[in-house]
Image (cartoon, rainbow, N blue to C red):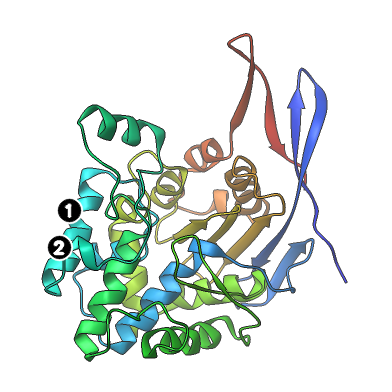
Amino acid sequence: MASPQVVAEVVRSGFVEGQHHGSVVALAPDGSVAWAVGDVDSPVLPRSCNKPLQAVAMVEAGLDLPPELLAMACASHSGEAMHLEAVQRILDGAGLTEDDLQCPVDWPMIDAVRDEALRSGASASRLFMNCSGKHAAMLATCVAKGWDTATNLSPDHPLQQAILATFARLTGEPVDTVAVDGCGAPLLSTSLTGLARAFRALAVATSGAEHRVASAIRAHPELVSGSTRDELTLLRAIPGAIGKAGAEACYAVALPDGQAFALKIEDGGARARPVAMAAALERSGVLEMAGVDAEAVRRTGVHVLHGGGVPVGEVRAAY
């Protein structure tokens, strides 16, 4: 069985002081595996990369949101005002309040946004929690279907059973593990190949729930992440791309031509995640495609190391 390989090196003053192991898979436009590094067939927990797939299931179950709010259902948001307002709109539309959310109380995940919230005198809240859009959408789906909202995070709940069925269909794999995500919601496993396959299904869809979710991400990538995030820069640089990052350094990106990419950094090192994805896209020739802002994509893969306040090295791709 394949095992994770070195996908990034930590280079300081020309000396390789560390390495990040991981796995990467790239699908060709026809959905076949174009190339792979490491173990792309064993189950992983994609964390928030699963959110667009969960959103597809919610739409199939009857969730009907405008594109900007459907984008919020896919979000690991930064806690900016635009995010809080969108989550509140989902709750208002379902006749619910912040008190109905079952994600943890938290602060914004981005330091600058958290600092601004502290300066304004705000308190930690469920709205600030980066998964609050998904949780609001899950509750709204339950309201639309007449399902119990209080137990919506139970793996046996009709909502979670619907998500599991859709997830297995999109990934093309049975769900090996149902874990608990950081936000408290059920977390489904799949391989990196299955994750790439699922994102490809959304990216090439021309109708149905998959198309609605992909269109929402394309129209409002700033709501899926935040105004300063590398994911936003990447999606704006590649016409028609969809993508989602997750905790523990998971990342999935798919293009409308059918190419799709999924990766995981084994140690969860977030700094290596965008570096590895930018390298994967370049290796597959995406940066040479018409309309792609190649320099913007490359910038997402730059992680500078400092010494004495000046640049002295980098985290660089090693595959």
Q: Position of residue 218 (x, y in %)?
A: 34, 61
Q: Amino acid at mark 1?
A: Glu
Front residue of this view, candidates 50 and 108 = 108
Q: Which residue is mark 2?
A: 89
Relative height, residue 30 to residue 242 (above, below): below
Front residue of this view, candidates 31 and 118 = 118
Does the CB distance between marks 1 and 2 fall below 8 Å?
Answer: yes
**Secondary element type, mark 1:** helix
Front residue of this view, candidates 151 and 88 = 151
Q: Amino acid at mark 2?
A: Arg
Q: Quadrant of residue 213?
A: bottom left
Q: Is residue 155 left or right of residue 17?
A: left
Q: Is residue 63 left or right of residue 23?
A: left
Which quarter of the rendered picture does the N terminus lie within?
bottom right
Say the numbered circle drawn on residue 85.
1
Residue beneath the point at 55% across and 86% down: 168
Residue beneath the point at 49% across and 78% down: 201
Q: Is residue 45 left or right of residue 222?
A: right
